[in-house]
Image (cartoon, rainbow, N blue to C red):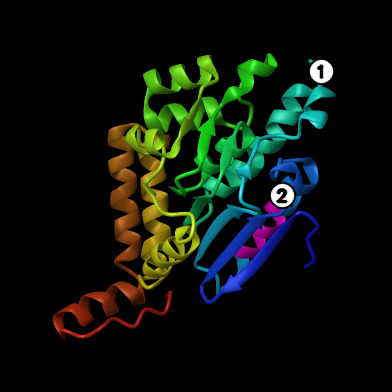
């Protein structure tokens, strides 16, 4: 499929999605969000793809936020639908059964920060900047930022960032747990590829099951989450990959996972 605002590259078992509006700092307009959704659906349905990396084109931005020209047109009747549109795509991303890595190479502000928050892991270049500056525009985060940021960094840090509209650098983002690691600009994508390739070397069904079980920690209470983990664990014990992985360990040889 041809895309106007993103680039989708298949690199073995890893799909690299590049937001491609560098002249607009990769701002998230309706076309880009729709194309991102289609690309994610392609990755979800691809038997070859086992992990996804999302980054931004150009040296300045991962994604600088929602398209302000489109945002300005919203009113009390259309605003909620505008928010739900972005929320639905980012929730679809969050609930993919394949790991999604954000390679944040520059500004990740507003909707761009919310996109990074929806990814399962975030790695940043030194020049990356993060923030939810919506209060400066007279609004609030609308693509899940108030929810995911609070879950990720805690209520106090989320309150400070959202209420102040402050923009933080990659080292501060690392300190508060917003990003996993910081890599040099030159090695960011390569390092993310290494992490993705390490993940895809594992049993595919175990990876997708792990994602499901980890999400249960956020979606359910502790007891319900533990029961969910036990059920998922039991399901995995019925797979060929489980038998192969444990037998390979006992036989002291590399496992040959088939995704079955």
Q: Residue 22, labelled with which disc?
A: 2
Q: Position of residue 199 (x, y in %)?
A: 38, 65
Image position of 205 with respect to 60: above or below: below
Q: Is residue 169 left or right of residue 66?
A: left
Q: Position of residue 184 (x, y in %)?
A: 43, 54
Between residue 197 and residue 82, name the one nearer to us. 197
Q: Secondary structure at mark 1?
A: loop
State which quarter of the image contains the N terminus.
bottom right
State which quarter of the image contains the C terminus.
bottom left
Q: Secondary structure at mark 2?
A: helix
Between residue 98 and residue 57, name the one nearer to us. 57
10 Å neighbourhood of mark 2: few (<14), some, or many (≥20)?
A: some
Q: First in sequence, mark 2 or 1: give its number.
A: 2
- In the rendered structure, does residue 53 fall within the stretch colored magenta? no
Inter-mark Cα distance, 2 to 1:
28 Å
The magenta-colored residue range is 36-43
Image position of 70 with respect to 6: above or below: above
Q: Are marks 2 and 1 in contact (CB under 8 Å)?
A: no
Residue at the disc numbered 1: 75
Q: Is residue 8 left or right of residue 169?
A: right
């Amino acid at each position: 499929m041809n895309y106007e605002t993103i680039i989708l590259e298949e690199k073995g078992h890893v799909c690299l999605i590049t937001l491609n509006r560098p002249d607009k700092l990769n701002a998230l307009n309706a076309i880009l969000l729709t194309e991102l959704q289609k690309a994610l659906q392609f990755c979800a349905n691809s038997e070859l793809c086992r992990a996804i990396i999302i980054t931004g084109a150009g040296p300045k931005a991962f994604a600088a936020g929602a398209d302000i020209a489109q945002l300005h047109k919203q009113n009390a009747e259309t605003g909620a639908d505008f928010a739900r549109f972005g929320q639905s795509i980012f929730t679809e991303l969050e609930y993919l059964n394949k790991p999604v890595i954000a390679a944040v190479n520059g500004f990740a502000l507003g909707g761009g920060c919310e996109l990074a928050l929806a990814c399962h892991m975030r790695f940043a270049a030194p020049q990356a900047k993060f923030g939810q500056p919506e209060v400066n525009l007279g609004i609030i985060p609308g693509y899940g930022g108030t929810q995911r940021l609070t879950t990720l960094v805690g209520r106090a840090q989320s309150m400070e960032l959202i209420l102040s509209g402050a923009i933080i650098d990659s080292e501060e983002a690392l300190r508060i747990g917003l990003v996993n690691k910081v890599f040099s600009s030159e090695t960011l994508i390569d390092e993310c590829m290494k992490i993705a390739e390490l993940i895809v070397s594992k049993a595919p069904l175990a990876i997708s099951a792990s994602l499901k079980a980890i999400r249960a920690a956020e979606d359910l209470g502790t007891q319900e989450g533990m029961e969910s983990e036990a059920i998922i664990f039991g399901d995995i014990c019925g797979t060929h990959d489980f038998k192969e992985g444990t037998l390979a360990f006992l036989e002291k040889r590399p496992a040959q996972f088939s995704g079955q």
